[in-house]
Image: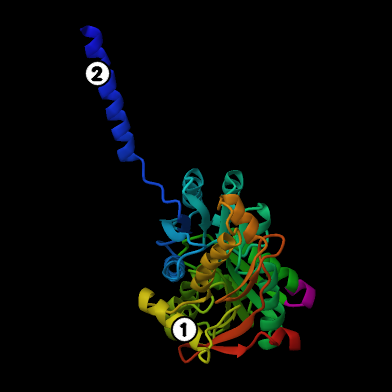
């Protein structure tokens, strides 16, 4: 009798265990591909993180509405990295440990992406950044990619074609964020400046989330530059406002924020005359481009820069990598291998990776005039000068 009771208890426990396992284990959808997204949704660079989220979701919605990628529906799993390298790496590790995540899109800064490189390399998981531009990033792993272009392309362009040729200036003061991206931008700018004879009369730097730039501005002003170059993304409006607030009417230029609407909102009239570089601009004569812009504004509530455009394009690159597998099984490795080989025409332009996993872009010159960004010189400027 006791044996029968024990046997019944064992059977009951096993049944309960099976039932519990069935409740906790999520059903597997074999036609769903999840993409992890790392973006600074809070903090100094929140505008760019929000642009990532909205741009990527626009792409996913459009792809899924058209039947998906080879019949697979896409889903974004979005996490806030806060622009912090440790936070980004913790989240990247969580994605790496989750077999339902097939690739990572993001992060925004080169520093975060570079911190994550060993993690994605060990996991065999693609990290495709819309914006990382440190020349060292993409080559860190076979699984690290970026589509923004490299600072060893844009920073030299800025020195030669914007400062020296377009503005006709020689004495330059530089203020830059002391991050992987900022240090790379400055070193590449300085190398070209030295080659062409630009005089960097002063260079100062600051740390992430710095708010008071007064002592750095005083040092720059004492060096009497003809133009001040700001190398950063999120803090650029604060630097501009504090320079103008000090009564200094020096020519300003910036590499990093692109044609950011937030910059115009936060700097206002202080941004008038600001000169910058960008690999992309919304052409009002292109109806498809303007329709994309209108959709983004309706969802985001602010104007897009190149950053959400590149975020949108990363999803289409993943789509193309999935489709390149044909009838073969989709894996993390197949996405990586196909991504390295494919080429597409994105909203931001032609996209074809270099062997290192990044790509080469051309740049135009823009300026702020009457509260708006205007193109001062197109992609042909560098070829003709």
**Does residue 237 belong to the magenta stretch?**
no
Q: Earlier in the sequence, mark 1 or mark 2?
A: 2
Q: Is residue 320 above or below residue 301?
A: above
Q: Is residue 298 left or right of residue 324?
A: left
Q: Is residue 168 visible?
A: no
Q: Pointer 1 and pointer 2: residues touching (CB < 8 Å)?
A: no
Residue at mark 2? 9
Image coords of residue 367 (percent x, y): 55, 86
Q: Which residues are magenta?
A: 193-198
Q: Quadrant of residue 53?
A: bottom left
Mark 2 Cα shell of 10 Å, populated few (<14), some (14-19), many (≥20) = few
- The answer to which of 222 and 4 lies nearer the viewer is 4
Q: Is residue 62 left or right of residue 158?
A: left
- Residue appearing at x 56%, y 72% in the figure: 256
Tag 2 secondary structure: helix
Q: Is residue 250 above or below residue 359?
A: below
**Does residue 195 belong to the magenta stretch?**
yes
Quadrant where the N terminus is found in the figure: top left
Image coords of residue 22 (percent x, y): 32, 38
- Residue appearing at x 50%, y 60% in the figure: 208
Quadrant where the C terminus is found in the figure: bottom right
Residue at mark 1? 270
Image coords of residue 119 (percent x, y): 57, 46
Most common SS among magenta residues? helix
């Amino acid at each position: 009798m006791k044996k029968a009771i024990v046997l019944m208890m064992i059977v009951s426990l096993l049944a309960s265990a099976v039932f519990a396992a069935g409740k906790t284990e999520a059903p597997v959808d074999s036609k769903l591909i999840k993409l992890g997204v790392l973006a600074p949704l809070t903090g100094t660079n929140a505008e760019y993180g929000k642009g990532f989220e909205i741009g990527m979701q626009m792409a996913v919605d459009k792809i899924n509405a058209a039947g998906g990628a080879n019949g697979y529906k896409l889903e974004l799993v979005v996490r806030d990295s806060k622009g912090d390298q440790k936070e980004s790496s913790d989240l990247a590790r969580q994605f790496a440990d989750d077999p339902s995540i097939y690739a990572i899109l993001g992060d925004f800064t080169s520093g975060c992406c570079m911190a994550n490189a060993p993690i994605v390399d060990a996991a065999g998981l693609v990290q495709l950044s819309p914006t990382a531009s440190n020349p060292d990033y993409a080559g860190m792993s076979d699984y690290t990619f970026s589509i923004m272009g490299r600072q060893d392309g844009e920073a030299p362009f800025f020195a030669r074609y914007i400062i020296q040729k377009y503005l006709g200036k020689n004495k330059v003061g530089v203020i830059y964020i002391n991050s992987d991206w900022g240090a790379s931008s400055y070193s590449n700018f300085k190398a070209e400046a030295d080659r062409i004879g630009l005089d960097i009369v002063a260079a100062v730097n600051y740390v992430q989330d710095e708010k008071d730039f007064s002592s750095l501005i005083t040092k720059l002003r004492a060096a009497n530059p003809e133009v001040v170059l700001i190398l950063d993304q999120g803090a650029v409006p604060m630097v501009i406002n504090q320079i103008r607030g000090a009564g200094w009417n020096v020519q300003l230029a910036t590499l990093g924020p692109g044609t950011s609407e937030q910059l115009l909102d936060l700097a206002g009239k202080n941004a008038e005359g600001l000169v910058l570089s960008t690999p992309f601009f919304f052409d009002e004569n292109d109806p498809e481009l303007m329709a994309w812009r209108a959709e983004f504004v309706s969802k985001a509530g602010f104007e897009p820069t190149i950053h959400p455009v590149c975020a949108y394009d990363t999803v289409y690159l993943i789509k193309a990598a999935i489709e390149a597998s044909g009838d073969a099984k989709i894996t993390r490795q197949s996405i990586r291998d196909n991504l390295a080989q494919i080429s597409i025409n994105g909203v931001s332009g032609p996209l074809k990776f270099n062997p290192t996993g990044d790509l080469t872009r051309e740049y135009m010159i823009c300026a702020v005039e009457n509260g708006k960004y205007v193109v001062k010189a197109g992609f042909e400027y560098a070829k003709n000068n």
